[in-house]
Image (tube, grey):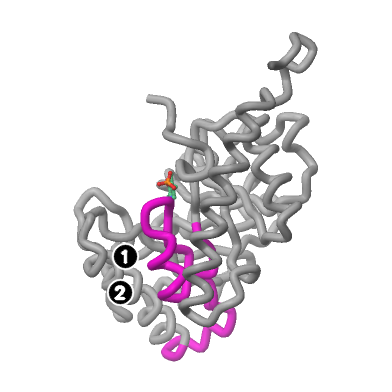
């Protein structure tokens, strides 16, 4: 039980529940990495923080650090960026990423918030990010989002090297943006084979585009969420984006 004095902290029982879920996620990650002959400590666990409160995000970060994991936070709603200025989260040294649908009119906020931007999903958005980064005098790492599942609800470039390479070239020419990888949201289906196909495709596209463009830093594969992180790790994910499996179901 918490006393009223603990209002800003997470109730002890909530903290324990969060730790139990988080350890379950890490066990899944470790098993998948072992199957693939990978070191799971090299995989970044990106906390998908949409609709989560600063106390629960702060606890998840602390637990991941205690367990020696690479941790990042990923926000996907521009209107929730301000919560990361909470004293529980400000100046914590955790890399901040933006993982949501980008809007040109929010580019300034996103550039100010995130050192890595995962969701460059169409041509015009790179121009907006570049302009804002130049004005702010900062450099930003970006990933190109690819629609590997063909689902119409999802953003991203078509899953061909021909569709993606021009954007990577455009980013390579930027003084302030640096292409560091590809991102996808796996197929939304219970068919594990279809999910694996979509994630495997991202890896093949990264390799092909890196080769074609000479983008030597194009190393990251941001893929895998609560439901498909094992498959993603087996297929080479370097960043998994996890929300509900750690924090619990999102509030409706
Ligand atoms: C919410 C979100 C996630 C995490 O989803 P969960 O299924 O809750 O793990 C990952 N990536 C993006 C882009 C998201 O918006």
Task: Using the rendered view, name the quadrant where residue 88 is placed.
Answer: top right
Locate residue 167 relative to residue 87 in the image: left or right.
left
Q: State the image coordinates of residue 117 (x, y, percent, origin top left).
A: 54, 56
Task: Using the rendered view, name the quadrant where residue 200 is placed.
Answer: bottom left
The residues colored magenta run 211-240
Q: Residue at x 73, y 20 (%)?
A: 8
Q: Quadrant of the C terminus?
A: top left
Locate residue 244 relative to residue 194 in the image: left or right.
right
Is the residue 19 above or below the residue 42 in the image?
A: above
Q: Secondary structure at mark 2?
A: helix
Q: Is residue 51 magenta?
A: no
Q: Residue at x 30, y 74 (%)?
A: 163
Nearer-the-camera pick, 238 or 101: 238
Can residue 133 be spotted in the picture? yes
Mark number displayed over residue 108: none
In the picture of the structure, the residue carrying the numbered disc 2 is 163
Q: Is residue 235 magenta?
A: yes
In the picture of the structure, the residue carrying the numbered disc 1 is 157
Nearer-the-camera pick, 172 or 208: 208
Q: Residue furthest top?
A: 4
Q: State the image coordinates of residue 79 (x, y, percent, origin top left).
A: 52, 31
Q: Secondary structure at mark 1?
A: loop
Q: Quote the CA–CA distance across marks 1 and 2.
A: 6 Å
Q: State the image coordinates of residue 222 (x, y, percent, origin top left).
A: 48, 64
Residues packed near mark 1 inside 10 Å, few (<14), some (14 to 19) or many (20 plus): many
Is the residue 42 above or below the residue 127 in the image?
A: below
Q: State the image coordinates of residue 212 (x, y, percent, origin top left).
A: 42, 89
Can residue 83 be spotted in the picture? no
Query: Quick check: marks 1 and 2 in contact, CB under 8 Å?
Result: yes
Residues packed near mark 2 inside 10 Å, few (<14), some (14 to 19) or many (20 plus): few
Q: Residue at x 53, y 72 (%)?
A: 220
């Amino acid at each position: 039980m918490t006393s009223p004095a603990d209002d800003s902290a997470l109730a002890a029982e909530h903290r324990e529940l969060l730790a139990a879920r988080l350890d379950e996620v890490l066990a899944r990650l470790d098993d998948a990495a072992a199957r693939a002959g990978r070191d799971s400590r090299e995989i970044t666990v990106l906390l998908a923080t949409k609709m989560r409160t600063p106390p629960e995000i702060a606890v998840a970060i602390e637990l991941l650090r205690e367990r020696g994991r690479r941790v990042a936070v990923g926000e996907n709603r521009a209107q929730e960026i301000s919560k990361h200025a909470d004293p529980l989260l400000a100046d914590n040294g955790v890399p901040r990423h933006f993982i949501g649908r980008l809007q040109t009119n929010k580019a300034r906020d996103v550039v100010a918030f995130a050192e890595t931007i995962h969701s460059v999903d169409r041509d015009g958005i790179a121009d907006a990010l570049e302009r804002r980064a130049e004005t702010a005098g900062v450099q930003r790492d970006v990933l190109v989002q690819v629609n590997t599942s063909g689902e119409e609800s999802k953003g991203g470039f078509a899953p061909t090297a021909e569709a993606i390479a021009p954007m990577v070239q455009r980013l390579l020419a930027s003084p302030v943006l640096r292409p560091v990888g590809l991102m996808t949201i796996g197929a939304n289906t219970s068919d594990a084979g279809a999910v694996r196909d979509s994630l495997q495709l991202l890896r093949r596209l990264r390799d092909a585009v890196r080769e074609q463009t000479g983008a030597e830093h194009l190393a990251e594969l941001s893929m895998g969420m609560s439901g498909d992180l094992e498959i993603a790790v087996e297929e080479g994910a370097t960043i998994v984006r996890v929300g509900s499996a750690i924090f619990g179901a999102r509030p409706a």
